[in-house]
Amino acid sequence: MGEQKCIGILTSGGDCAGLNAVIRAVVYRATGTYNWKVMGIRQATNGLMSRPPEAIPLNIEKVDSWLTIGGTMLGTTNKGNPFAFQMADGTVRDRSDDIIQGYHQLGLDALIGIGGDGSLAILRKIALAGNLNLVAIPKTIDNDVGITERSIGFDTAVNIATEALDRLHFTAASHSRVIIVEVMGRDAGHIAISAGISGGADIILIPEIPYTISKICAQIQERQDRGKNYCLIIVAEAVRTEEGELVMHTNRLGQSRLGGIGQYLADTISDCSGAETRVTVLGHIQRGGTPSSLERLIASAFGIAAVDLIAEEKYDCMVSWQKREVVSVPLEDAIAKYRPVDFDGTLVKTARGLGICLGD
Ligand code: F6P
């Protein structure tokens, strides 16, 4: 059985469905199979910066009901780079060493970091600087982490967007409207293309494939000629205007985020085709709620595999879903290889084969 280890686990970056299912699996494997201790670190790396470090002991009794709970019971943050951390007094400090010391103060032998490409790159940099034993688990509804077919959160987000399309078919048909559904995904179109196919969208717009408004309007007209009085369009938030501008929403503090391409398309399509248009922005609904069954399955498999990697003392690696198996890949390679939608891949071919317009 080996020495009794104490491992830490944290969730970092935007939350999503399935994170608690990962934590539950980690606790089952680490405490049940190996008789190790597990510490759940609060608010991502912020918990390791706090003094004393903010962490809670986790056992099977505590996490058993977490399988179906959305969000993350440990809390998270997608703000603040620990290497340039904004302090309360307005100064900026490198807090990476505080995180390394926090790891030692908790007596950790290894750390499981659950995050997207940005968080995992930061965690790796800290782990290398402090010689910490890190195993990574990919999570992001955007599904854009390199060398894994699946990241935690993606399947649930796709199911939510698919259900939205299912519902919108009826109202769009009832009013003879063009309805545009704007989905998340940051720079990638994975949610849009997957949900668009599954939810029977007529037009799918993703950042990886440039479009023209005239192609979109021609598709709407062609549907009308076939007696179809409505049209559903799904668009990824990072799709640009026809002139190539990113559409951003800026708040009163001057902080900008992606958002608004749906409304741009609604106005432009309405001008060009005369169609009545409406927009649904799914936003954070895609991150919330109960994880899908596939999500729970992948989350559980990732959690078990991550603990087994620690048992083998294999670090600086990431669990990865490939051809229905969990394998481990070098973390360095995973974060170096951003994964957009494959222009010539199966999903693009499938969409085209179904007569779905991709705007090009
Ligand atoms: O990366 C996940 C994600 O949900 C993106 O799809 C989206 O652009 C972003 O996070 C939203 O971030 P926030 O929760 O800070 O609004």
Image (cartoon, helix red, strand yellow):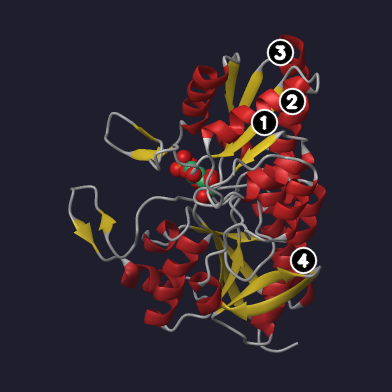
Closer mark to the observer between disc 4 and disc 1: 1
Q: Secondary structure at mark 1?
A: helix
Instruction: Tell me which label, 3 or 4, sits earlier in the chain.
Output: 3
Provide residue 240's location: percent of width, then percent of height.
45, 41
Which residue is at 72% across, 49% downward? Answer: 155
Let me know if residue 65 appears in the view.
Answer: no
Q: Which mark, residue 147?
A: none
Closer mark to the observer between disc 3 and disc 4: 3
Q: Residues within 10 Å of mark 4 (few under 14, many from 20)?
A: many
User: Which residue is denoted by mark 4 in the rendering?
Assistant: 301
User: Which residue is denoted by mark 3 in the rendering?
Assistant: 176
Q: Residues within 10 Å of mark 2 (few under 14, many from 20)?
A: some
Q: Which kind of residue does numbered mark 2 sit on? A: Arg
Instruction: Tell me which label, 4 or 2, sits earlier in the chain.
Output: 2
Q: Which kind of residue does numbered mark 4 sit on? A: Ala
Q: Which kind of residue does numbered mark 1 sit on? A: Gln
Q: Is mark 3 within 8 Å of ligand 1?
A: no
Mark 2 and mark 1 residues within 8 Å of each other at the beta carbon: yes
Q: Secondary structure at mark 4?
A: helix
> In front here: 176 or 308?
176
Which residue is at 44% across, 37% downward? Answer: 241
Q: CA distance from mark 4 to mark 2?
A: 44 Å
Q: Which mark, residue 223?
A: 2
Q: Which kind of residue does numbered mark 3 sit on? A: Ser
Q: Which mark, residue 219?
A: 1
Task: Tell me if 84 is positioned left or right of 244 in this view.
Answer: left
Instruction: Tell me which label, 1 or 3, sits earlier in the chain.
Output: 3
Closer mark to the observer between disc 1 and disc 3: 1
Provide residue 178's location: percent of width, then percent of height.
64, 21
